[in-house]
Image (tube, rainbow, N blue to C red):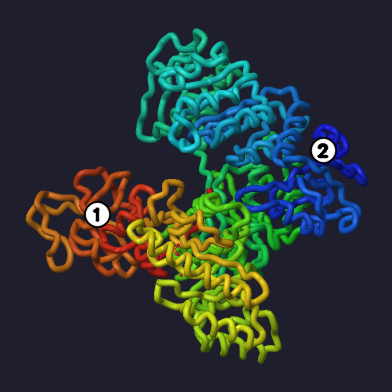
Amino acid sequence: MLLSYLSRQLSPIEARIVHDTDLAHLLTDSRTLSEPSSTLFFALRTASGDGHLYIRDLYDRGVRCFVISRTEEDWSQTMPDANYICVADPLNALQQAAGLKRMQYDIPVIGITGSNGKTIVKEFLYQLLRKDYRIVRSPRSYNSQIGVPLSIWQMSGEHTLGIFEAGISQTNEMERLEAVIRPTLGIITNIGAAHQENFADTRTKLQEKLRLFSRCQAIVYNADHKEIATAISSSPEAAVAIGWSKTNPGAQVYICKIETEETHTTIKFRSDGADYSITVPFTDEASIEDVLHCITLISILRPEVLYAQDRFASLEPVEMRMEVKAGDRGNTIINDVYSSDVYSLALALDFQQRRTAGTQMKKVVVLSDILQSGMSAEELYAHVAAQLRIYRPDFFIGIGEDIVAQRHRFADLHAAFFRDVTELLTSAVLYECSDSCILLKGARKYRFEQITERLVQQVHETALRINLSAIVHNLNYYRSLVPSGTKTICMVKAQGYGVGSYELVKTLQEHRVDYIAVAVADEGKELRERGITMPIVVMNPERNAFQMLIDYRLEPEIYSFTLLRSFSEIVVRNGLSDYPVHIKIDTGMHRLGFMPADIAKLTEALAEYEGLHVRSVFTHLAAADDPAFDDFTRSQLLSFDEVFNALESSLGYRPLRHTLNTAGVERFAHFPTDMIRLGIGLYGVTASGVSGLRPVATLTTTILQIKDVPAGETVGYGRRGRLSRDSRIAVMPIGYADGLDRRLSCGVGEVVIRGRRCPIVGNVCMDICMADITDIAAEEGDTVLLFGEELPIAEVAEKMQTIAYEVLTGISPRVRRVYFQE
Ligand SMILES: *Cc1c(COP(=O)(O)O)cnc(C)c1O
């Protein structure tokens, strides 16, 4: 689409087109820029930031087309050859642009909504129909007000079917998505409690979701689901509804029988007078339900596919994770287990790009043949090579017959090719990778897990898994509680409350957190050495680490006169001026900080000592989580106000002021603050009982051995675990040296195996503990959860009679941290 055409369609407030361009790419996030010359950037304002702040940077990187909503700056002066379209609402413009694109193609488009399973249904349909259509679909779960337009923009003349997801969290959002997707066929998967807070009730939410289908020729739904069936029958879309049912033989698709065996499930059903039987390699109810939606959709779109037994039998489970693991020799391994195809390759390369930006790490990409792409090998690998050329890995490893045959296309890359994984493993190539970020992306049949095993020495079966997407969710949750424009400082002291600071900080830096704070200078140094560039505050700067602070651009917290004087001296000795420092005021915590009574002396000292610039002034609340102390908290806040005002007027400039920790943001967000200081909430633990957070950390291990022990015997040291019945005991490789607190011994603590709680038996040992699994069908090798979604950290903390902070920070460094994004 041409910029000039788009500009006319958007009816802008003002526009300047210096030279017309064809727009191949839309961009809303400056970090994912790939081809500047054909990119149109939309400067959106969201909870996490203002796109206008990145225009200059993008211009410097070659972008020339912008959709903006502000024109204070005189662009014709500073960016003479930039095109811009100024509109009232850039998000609206983005959706309009995508809507225009959509209108150019007259192909069937499937729109999927519902509370869960959207992505799985989309991916199953893709797998089932890719032999019959050239399919364009949402990347991963791009289903939001921003994600949907970006997905639609991928449509081109070669596609013959579109499959897009639509997710909403508020009323009136679906109408906007409908205008962008304009689905001709619809699926509603189910309805649950997600995002309930923004809707009056489930019915309202359902009615809103059904708006996606206002132009559909058919809507697929579960006719056994009472609420959905009622809503559909009373909505204007009722005429075209096609339901599946396990109970009603009169349904359009009647599911006669579902037989689940150990590894697969056979589904017998009747549609349009014909009987079918298919077998899928799943046994869980959720996957079967997803398959039933697919069957019903296919019965409308292309019923002959229902006879393609092999396609159903070879459906692959959809995993939506990118796992990041620490390997040996300084390597980081990104394991992209998402389905292997061309556009998920672009996403994975982009992910790797961000992980390595600003670091010294080399980028290594290991890619297998991409199967069943629907393109010829020539076309496919030309495409792959073009993608790689954008991201320029330092080393490319291709695995598989097709890639080997197409190796000439990768001639301009440093590359190696192997027919299969065994050939790679017998070569020395992997041993030569060090200090690299290695992206593994392989179709299932190539068994890339063998490569992972080789790269990661598995010393310990126990792992702390960190969901980086949940951290981002929590960050944005707290941002939404305070006025936009409020800055954020994230507390990553104690190695990020135990979850490990580097991956965390990398993610926070990407999400434009303004500051992070660490406890000691060494933590800051390590982050700088690994490429973190964002501002870092050191909360407990020791005198002998002052030079380190300066060498690594770390900003100290100053809490005493001695510290102030000696830091000023060292700054001056280094020939520096305006070095940022953060002044801490003690308004009642009575830990570190200047007392309000010292303020006159402090202003004098600040005027006298040279070289410093007070970047911020702050205080810490002692009991913001406890309503019983609200008067005290308010007195802290008021006393801080006075101190701040006094300091500001004597300094002659305005430092940032900040007071609120997690509990403070949850309960005192109405007190003005320039910056919030997030700690425990970021890690998914609420300070006062708010419900918008997602758990971040999951501690798991495995069952090493199972044994039957008769009643009357005892388990473990000191014979403390006496059995009152014949029992099955599971032995697990985790003990107090890993951070499993000994206070959880003898039935105080529990573990979760196969979704069921099992009590810990006997004393927790140094490296081992035992649980009673008499009541469940567990096996050796099963995963055991110590805390996580099914057993909240807060609950474990309560059993230990302590706080969640101690549980998290107590996990020993020898426990491997595994990071993933959803
Ligand atoms: C640790 C810390 C925080 C964060 O506290 P949470 O209760 O985890 O939110 C905020 N401010 C200061 C000064 C801290 O030391």
Q: Is residue 581 left or right of residue 712?
A: right
- Category of crowding for the residue at label 2, using alpha-carbon neighbours closer than 10 angstroms: few (below 14), some (14–19), many (at least 20): many
- Closer to viewer: mark 2 or mark 1: 2
Amino acid under disc 1? Ala
Q: Is residue 544 left or right of residue 610?
A: left
Residue 128 versus residue 35: which sits nearer the camera?
35
Q: Report the residue at 46% width, 25% height from top.
A: 203
134 is higher (above) or lower (below) than 457:
above
Determine which quarter of the picture holds residue 333: bottom right
Which x, y percent locates residue 245? 43, 17
**Is residue 322 visible to the viewer in this orientation of the structure?**
no
Q: Report the residue at 57% width, 74% height from top.
A: 646
Task: Confirm if mark 1 falls within 8 A of ligand 1.
Answer: no
Amino acid under disc 2? Pro
Which x, y percent locates residue 125? 57, 29
Q: Which residue is mark 1?
A: 730
Q: Report the residue at 61% width, 73% height from top.
A: 648
Residue 124 versus residue 780: which sits nearer the camera?
124
Say whether disc 2 or disc 1 marks the residue closer to the N-terminus. 2
SS at badge 2: loop
Q: How many marks?
A: 2
Q: Report the residue at 60% width, 30% height from top.
A: 174
Residue 230 versus residue 264: which sits nearer the camera?
230
Residue lying farthest left?
Answer: 712
Q: Which residue is mark 2?
A: 12
Q: Separation of disc 2 and disc 1 at Cα?
A: 67 Å
Q: Is residue 51 left or right of residue 140?
A: right
**Is residue 642 visible to the viewer in this orientation of the structure?**
yes
171 is higher (above) or lower (below) than 18:
above
358 is higher (above) or lower (below) than 573:
above
